[in-house]
Image (cartoon, rainbow, N blue to C red):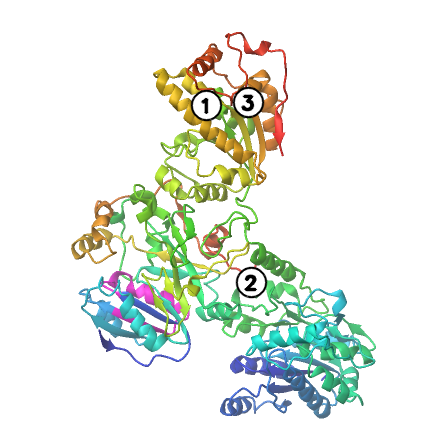
Amino acid sequence: MSQVSGGEVPSDGVLVFSTMRNEMLRLEHWLSHYRKLGATHFLIVDNNSDDGTEDYLAQQPDVSVWSTTDSYKASRFGVDWLTCLQINFGAGRWCLTVDADELLVYPDSATRDLDALTNHLEATGHDAFGTLMLDMYPKGPLGQVSFKEGQDPIQVLPWFDGDNYRAKLHPVFGNLWIQGGVRDRLFFGGQPERSPTLNKTPLVKWRRKYAYVTSTHQILPRRLNDVFDMGQGDRVSGVLLHTKFLPNIAVKSEEELVRAQHFENSELYQPYYNALIADPDLWVETSIKYQGTAQLEAMGLMSRGTWNSAS
Amino acid sequence: MSVGVVMLVHTALHRAEQVIRHWSAAGCPVVIHVDKNVDRAVYDDFVNSVADLPDVLFSKRHRCEWGTWGIVAASQSASSLMLEKFPDVRHVYLASGSCLPLRPIKDLQEYLAKRPRTDFIESATTADVPWTQGGLDFERFTLRFPFSWRKHRFLFDRYVEFQRRFKMYRRVPDGIVPHMGSQWWCLTRQTLSAILEDPDRGVYDAYFRRVWIPDESYFQTLVRLYSQNIESRSLTLSKFDYQGKPHIFYDDHLQLLRRSDCFVARKIWPNADRLYENFLNEEYPLKGAEPNPGKIDRIFAKAVERRTRGRAGLFMQSRLPRAGHENGFTSAPYSVFEGFADLFEDFEPWLARMTGTRVHGRLYSKAGVEFEGRQKTFSGAMSSNAKLRDHHAQSFLINLIWNTRGERQCFQFGPTDSQFVSWDLAKDPNAQISVISGAWAIPLFQSNRNFAEIRAEAAELQRIESEHLDALRSPWTKARIRIWTLADFIETPMEALQTVLDEMGAKNLRRVTEAPKMADLNGFGQFLQNLKNQGMHPYLMGDFPTESSPVNDRPSRRKPYLVR
């Protein structure tokens, strides 16, 4: 892994960490989304992109880029690359680790920046923040959506599954294990235990000894997975709007099938990728259209805990 | 020049500067105390940044740590300087760098000019208010606190325990009664100077130096010695969460703050550009309007309630209550019917007509979820796939009830269904469960299967239902439950149905006039006898006469019994 570009990493504010491969479609909006939330710098590992992602990133003043051609799978799906950066740049500060297809929202995120959130978390004695990954999809077959580079993906993927999520405690890591959503409903009905994990802990006040286990689903030490309340009350939490289902999903899925770089048992996911390549329609009558953070909060997909509200 | 501002500053100095300019432009002298923890260089820059303003002074710096004497010392020094240098000042307003005036300063000046002898300071005895957090209320006046709560929590706690154990209490100085209240006050020159120039000040200071959180009690206590007219409330809007941490106001609070009619609010988030922009340019005077923080109080009380109680029946990434601590397993009442759909041919549509509720089939059917109208997905995009449901059968029920808040749900349940939620139903106070035990035999009786098969199936179903009934009758049961045997039920079916519907509390429910169509039970008694003859004793359906005489003729009438 070698550094391609990047200026000084500022000494305050939230840092964003990510690995990417061919994300030109989403990149512009993704960067602007997190800039609006007040992220001060991006640290990105580019894994062999050939669509201009690396060059685009290198031109951004607030982005530091590293490049690698190593195997994504062998680096535990990019976790090792990022852990390395987090140790070097993230110790003692709030680090947000998100993929290019994840847009973080939290209660009142339109008016409260990430510093406000981390300040609240610290004031309430927490150093990690939990989120639910919400799969967003269009109405109609996936491939027939028209999407321009740089556009807000939520404009063309405004639909989601309201509440078909199931949560239990993970027996090993003590994290909440949430499954459900549209992929579960359509593609994993026959093997629910393999259905994608939807809980993530993307925002953490980092220390050198910390490490994510698989993606940002689980983190060690176990204590950091404690982002939920086991009594009656609740805590502040957010949602990662997951923009996986843009029109290039079929192409990407074919590529994944060939590269076999995702998950421990890639062959088990073959039917899933095949289903995606077949250009399915994920929308149903009971799908819900995204309207903003207040809606997600009212639906119970996220919560504000003690973070005071204005209404 | 009637109001002077004493401002305690330790961070977000650029915002403090803006607010200082705002006060100063309205003719208020400002004395600033900057925490000694702030760098010398940063301090010097800050002093320079407001050097152009008249009537802005800096007082002697003290080290301010939360909960310690430094904050009181800072207020004392700055107040003394204010009284000494600005003889025209009548009221001194204590503010912090994160306080923001919400109304034109002129409003405040006029308000105070009309109340020249009133001291605005929240001041209450500890015995009468439950404000304090963390178990130290009166003890904060009688114990010693040499260790920092923030940095040496362990020593802090141990030393408190130690003093309690050996009853090492301090004496409160004669003549004062400890009072507490918000740190942010507005006092008249007379009262403030009396406190600062008190001949016994040395005694009081020595005492309060060791009191826990003296900034909430020093002035609040001593003001009782001198004030002619205490208005026990703070002019600064300041809210605390359930842990005693101050709430922060953000841009989204703009309208709420505006409607509060309060003079000053804290704490304001330093990046809340909209708030600073709007309130520092606020031009509309509210004349003599009284501050009205009531609405904010209500909203914040709701937030505390939510934090401590959560939303009943919601399980999500930041709320996963342990079993038994849920404050409601589900979010709303619902009804479970067992055996009714076996006994009545058109029970579901009939129930929907009679009650106007959402009536599902057998939600836990092994073949797949029978949502109302047998939809493939239901509210919240819940899938009818049985495997997904059974992967977490509790979540399924919780989600269904959560997704349909505001509309009562009814569903069928029985021994042929997957039984994972059997205990959850029994323990849920929101569940209304009505059971006709043994009714599962009716479909067997009507079926065209070999008798040996039927016999095996009947034995299995009887075992399952009996286990389920044990759960319903256990001491842990919290659901509202009625159980009839099949024989009892068909004695007086209409009465029984009426009872169940009444308990559902359906609105506008009239007497049940239209009956659902009951299955033809001619020969059912003999069917049961045949099972017995094969050595399988069906007992859950009650006593059926062997002859197929009309069942309504049975002489004895037993009442249905009610469990809880």
Residue A308 - label: 2
Instruction: Please provide percent x and percent y for residue A202.
Output: 38, 64
Mark 1: amino acid: Trp
Q: What stretch of residues is rendered in magenta?
A: A20-45
Residue B90 - label: none
Disc 2 vs disc 3: which is toward the camera? 3
Instruction: Check residue A34 for magenta coloring.
Output: yes
The one nearer the camera, A21 or B557, is B557
Q: Secondary structure at mark 2?
A: loop
Q: Which residue, as the protein is rendered here, is positioned at the far front?
A: B535
Estimate how packed mark 2 is, as few (under 14), some (14 to 19) or many (20 or more) residues with alpha carbons within 10 Å.
many
Q: Secondary structure at mark 3?
A: strand
Where residue B416 sits, quadrant-wise, is top left
**Residue that numbered label 1 is attached to:** B440
Instruction: Please provide percent x and percent y for residue B464.
Output: 45, 30
Mark 2: amino acid: Asn
Q: Give the residue drawn at x 58%, y 11%.
A: B552
Q: Is residue B563 above or below residue A124?
A: above
Can see residue B224?
yes
Disc 2 to disc 1, C-alpha distance: 53 Å
Label 2 resides on the chain identified as A
Estimate how packed mark 1 is, as few (under 14), some (14 to 19) or many (20 or more) residues with alpha carbons within 10 Å.
many
Disc 2 vs disc 1: which is toward the camera? 1
Instruction: Please provide percent x and percent y for residue B491.
Output: 58, 16
**Share a chain, discs 3 and 1?**
yes
Q: Disc 2, disc 3: CB below 8 Å?
A: no
**Share a chain, discs 2 and 3?**
no
Q: Is residue A208 above or below residue B50?
A: above
Can see residue B385?
no
Q: Disc 3, disc 1: CB below 8 Å?
A: no
Residue B485 - label: 3
Instruction: Please provide percent x and percent y for residue B486.
Output: 53, 20
